[in-house]
Image (tube, rainbow, N blue to C red):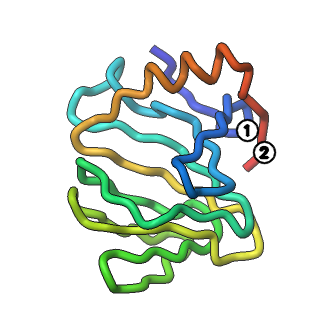
């Protein structure tokens, strides 16, 4: 088990759902080798990056490490600043955008845990890993 994660060492993996732009992940910062109760990804959204409205089958929460997140849950808009947490219950339509002038960096907690093994294998095979200093 890896005990220390250094975001600047990544690996940062580009991953976007259809209709999104500017997302990179360090998948499984905390996951199955540590706990089966939840999983955590580190996410970076480029300036101007966004996701479309979508629905996820699990609960998740975003902790903003740096930047300013514009989050829409159902029909409510939020500005989520550094140090704040927003919770998104499963089944609620939502969208995310970087409303700041620096990269948006967040820890994302998933309950139940997400299985990222296929995405990590696909990225490794396509050599989509990039370095990024936080």
Question: Which callout, 2 or 1, points at the residue further toward the start of the chain?
Answer: 1
The residue indicated by pointer 2 is 133
Residue at image position (70%, 19%) is: 126
Using the image, determine if residue 24 lies above or below residue 101. above
Q: Secondary structure at mark 2?
A: loop
Mark 2 and mark 1: span between their CA atoms?
A: 4 Å
The residue indicated by pointer 1 is 8
Label 2 neighbour load within 10 Å: few <14, some 14-19, many 20+: few
The quarter of the picture where residue 73 lies is bottom left
Q: CB atoms at circles 2 and 1 under 8 Å apart?
A: yes
- Residue 121 point in image, percent of width and height: 55, 16
Residue at image position (42%, 85%) is: 77
Residue at image position (51%, 33%) is: 27
Q: How many marks?
A: 2
- Residue 62 point in image, percent of width and height: 42, 59
Relative horizontal placement of residue 121, taking residue 98 as reference (left or right): left
Quadrant assignment for the N terminus: top left
């Amino acid at each position: 088990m890896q005990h220390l994660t250094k975001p600047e060492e990544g690996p940062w993996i580009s991953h976007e759902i259809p209709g999104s732009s500017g997302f990179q992940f360090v998948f499984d910062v905390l996951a199955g080798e540590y706990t089966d109760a939840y999983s955590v990804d580190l996410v970076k959204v480029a300036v101007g990056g966004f996701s479309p409205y979508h629905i996820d089958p699990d609960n998740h929460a975003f902790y903003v490490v740096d930047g300013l997140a514009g989050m829409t849950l159902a029909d409510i808009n939020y500005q989520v600043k550094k140090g704040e947490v927003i919770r998104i219950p499963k089944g609620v339509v939502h969208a995310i955008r970087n409303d700041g002038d620096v990269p948006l960096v967040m820890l994302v907690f998933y309950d139940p845990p997400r299985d990222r093994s296929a995405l990590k294998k696909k990225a490794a095979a396509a050599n989509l890993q990039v370095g990024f200093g936080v």
